Image: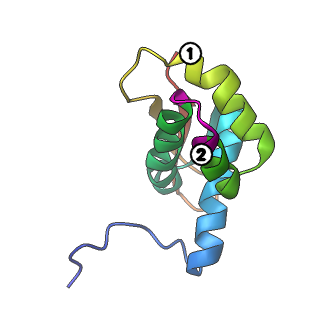
Amino acid sequence: MKHLKKNRKFGRTADYRKSFLWNLGSSLILKERIKTTEARAKEIRPLVERALTAAKKDTLSNRRNLLKKMGARPVGKLFKDLAPRFKERNGGYLRIIKIGARKNDAAKTVFIEFVK
């Protein structure tokens, strides 16, 4: 039975999958818009939204917890640029825009971006 098994595995081991998702989230934070598959976008959305919510409360503990998961550049951008921009917003920082299937393997592709 598939009860309480909601995350996708992407054919990777747990450590590699966690690293892969945080790196994808870091790219999204730095570029503010990336093109990826629908499954990947749906998996990184809660990670990035939780990170941004933590960045809205600028404490040393929150900075250190985020630095454990991603590099200094994305964390700096989160605290300096993105958190003040979304200070008044109570969630829903990202949007997923479907753009159709990829040509070679027909994977559903999307743009994931920050809401303006």
Question: Which residue bears the numbered disc 2?
Answer: 61
Q: Which residues are magenta?
A: 56-62
Is residue 71 among what the camera can see? yes
Q: For residue 19, which quarter of the picture?
A: bottom right
Question: Residue at point 63% right, 48% down?
Answer: 66
6 or 102, which is in the foreground?
A: 6
Q: Which mark is residue 85?
A: 1
* Residue 99 shows in the view: no
Q: Give the residue at x 68% y 57%.
A: 68
Q: Tell me how many marks there are.
A: 2
Picture disc at residue 27: none
The coloring applied to the image is rainbow
* CA–CA distance in space, label 2 to label 1: 21 Å
Which quadrant would residue 85 be assigned to in this image? top right
Q: Amino acid at mark 1?
A: Arg
On screen, residue 9 versus residue 72, left or right, reads left
Residue 74 screen position, x and y as percent: 72, 39
Q: What type is the residue that disc 2 sits on?
A: Ser
